[in-house]
Amino acid sequence: MSQSTEHREFQAEVRQLLDIVIHSLYTDKEIFVRELVSNASDSLDKLKHIQLTQPEVHQGHLPLEIHITTNEEERTLSIADHGVGLTHDELVQNLGTIAHSGSKTFVEALKQAGKDGANTTQLIGQFGVGFYSAFMVASEVDVYTRSCQPEGSSYVWTSDGKTGYTIDESADLPRGARIVLHLNEADAEFAKPERIKQILAKYSNFVGYPIFLNAERVNTVEALWLKNKADVSQEEYNAFYKFTAHAFGDPTYTLHFNLEGNRVIKALLFAPGENMELWGMGQMKPGVSLYCKKVLIDPEPPKLLPEWMRFVRGVIDCEDIPLNISRESMQDSALVRTIGETVTKRFLKFLDQEATDNGEKYNEFYAKFARFIKEGVATDHDHREAVAKLLRFESSMTEPGKLTSLAEYVSRAKEEQKTIYYQVAPSRSTIESGPYLEAFKARGLEVIYLYEQIDDYVISSLREFNGKALKSVNSDQLDLPDGPPAEGEALSEESTNGLVSWLKEKLGDKIVEARSSQRLISSPAAALLPENEPTAQMRHMMRALKQDTGLDQPRVILELNPRSELIKSLAVKKDTDSETATLIAEHLLDTTLLSAGLIEDPQILATRSQKLLELLAAKL
Ligand code: ADP
């Protein structure tokens, strides 16, 4: 080492990551080749783009190729490109730290996945850690590099992948980067040309630049998305998906299409097999790259497709995009908007068709990706109804675990039914044992079951589907048709009125009003939500966002079942033992709030239950 050797430590997250990469990833070691070749290819893409906008790059004549060299005797493997290379600062920034802002979360998730015995390799490469995979097989990695910027020098970066690295100035190097791996004894296979050739065979045809292995050309550059659909096999699609998405498994869906309208748009899109956001990894970046006639314009264009479609991977190629368009102006470009719009519509139609043709497969996909669909309904104003078609849920007419759609709900509904009913509650049993469902069952009306807090928000953004309004079963604004004639003797109208005004007096501000119910069949009472009162789920969200200042105890409409024995007894008790009757009335209200998910302080229920039990025990 020369005197000017600079020693630096890796950022803590990189050290953790390396520790995991080196010690926990034994399977699929060969992916490091893909990661390094893909870095070389990215670097060539960047160079091509710079050449379009900047008059001069260093050594502009060098060919855009990737050269791989093996040396069995020295047990080394090198991967070289004439791409953008790295400046001194870029070496420190890009190879000493993890650029991704969620790096900490990533390392945590990786550790957790390791503990759970999950397939940790799935995570590598998804979050900008590809380069470090070299340390799975190498005890030392050297990066010889010269940046494409006209000013600058050549450097050698060296590390054993443990605590830190060194940077030395070097004699003049050609533009680009050459990564040299000094392989572990156990990983000597990766210095064998046949082994590398076999690995490259899997994906090298998707790399947009010529690849040479020991000076022999190994790939034919082909843009799969420009080919005719009939000429591509599913195996080729899968291999391409794995290469572009850095994925391990196969995609769930593949959509390849050509649109020849005003614009020629060719697209190859994939819905992945796994949802990485479920791994606690933070938000994915958009994963559909934009090309113009095979030239990469932007690997992750931020506003090409709607935000909720960020899980989709693949390529869109449009001949009409100006090659030197800048990222900023691209976002505002009407052309890019048209492309995004066209592709989004096509993708939505495709998913809807897939869901119809093979419901079981779609439901499996939905189990993993429902969050994105829901986000789409809530946020994508332009495609709301089309995305809503993709929603799935259980209902009062499905068996547990079986899913249905809004369109199916509508097809089952009677023509005169103007409303789609739903209830948001933690589980099927909560809904089916609560007081709301009975009115709908008795009238043969289907109720959608929604189990997640965000569903309430999603459904209220949707508002209606196929011209039918979506309303919660606990809304007081429902115009329910007449039910079947009620059984059993009801409290007289006079006694009911007496009870209602007594309740209003005793419960005071806690209720908006008390009234006799047309809906209840076996439950004694239920809480209905007046029009502008925040729902249980909204309250939950406001609290989570700390916007709950001024959030009062909810004020509900208390509906009473005049046929219920409890209500009939209460009507008598209020005149004979007002104190006990008040206790019962308060408790009844709180249990209806509990069923509505609106109870603010459950302890009140416990305390009062004890008092009531005391009274009961005294009577036994
Ligand atoms: P990712 O490629 O996902 O960003 P990596 O860990 O593979 O993450 O690489 C980190 C960074 O190092 C890259 O973003 C890039 O800036 C730089 N880099 C890696 N390989 C090369 C290369 N062959 N030429 C130039 N820069 C490179």
Image (cartoon, grey):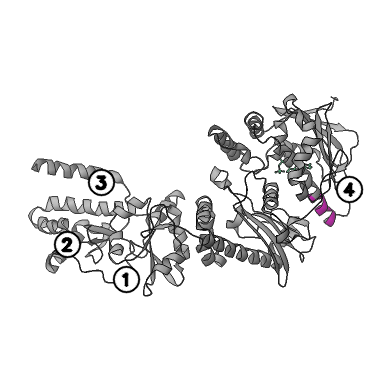
- The image quadrant that residue 233 belongs to is bottom right
Residue type at mark 3?
Answer: Leu
Q: Which residue is mark 3?
A: 605
- The image quadrant that residue 467 belongs to is bottom left
Residue 425: mark in rendering: none
Q: Are marks 1 and 2 in contact (CB under 8 Å)?
A: no
Q: Which residue is mark 1?
A: 479
Magenta region, residue range: 45-52
Q: Secondary structure at mark 1?
A: loop
Residue 63: mark in rendering: 4
On the rendered image, what quadrant is the C terminus found in? top left
Q: Is mark 4 within 8 Å of ligand 1?
A: no
Q: CA distance from mark 2 to mark 4?
A: 88 Å
Q: CA distance from mark 1 to mark 2?
A: 21 Å
On the rendered image, what quadrant is the N terminus found in? top right
| Along the viewing direction, whichever of 70 and 498 lies nearer the viewer | 70
Q: CA distance from mark 4 to mark 3?
A: 77 Å
- Is any atom of residue 245 visible in this view? yes
Query: What is the x, y in percent for residue 311?
Result: 60, 53
Residue at horizontal 65%, vertical 32%?
Answer: 21
**Which mark is in front, 4 or 3?**
4
Q: Residues within 10 Å of mark 3 (few under 14, many from 20)?
A: some
Residue type at mark 4?
Answer: Pro
Marked residue nearer the N-terminal end (3 or 2): 2
Residue type at mark 2?
Answer: Arg
Residue 563: mark in rendering: 2
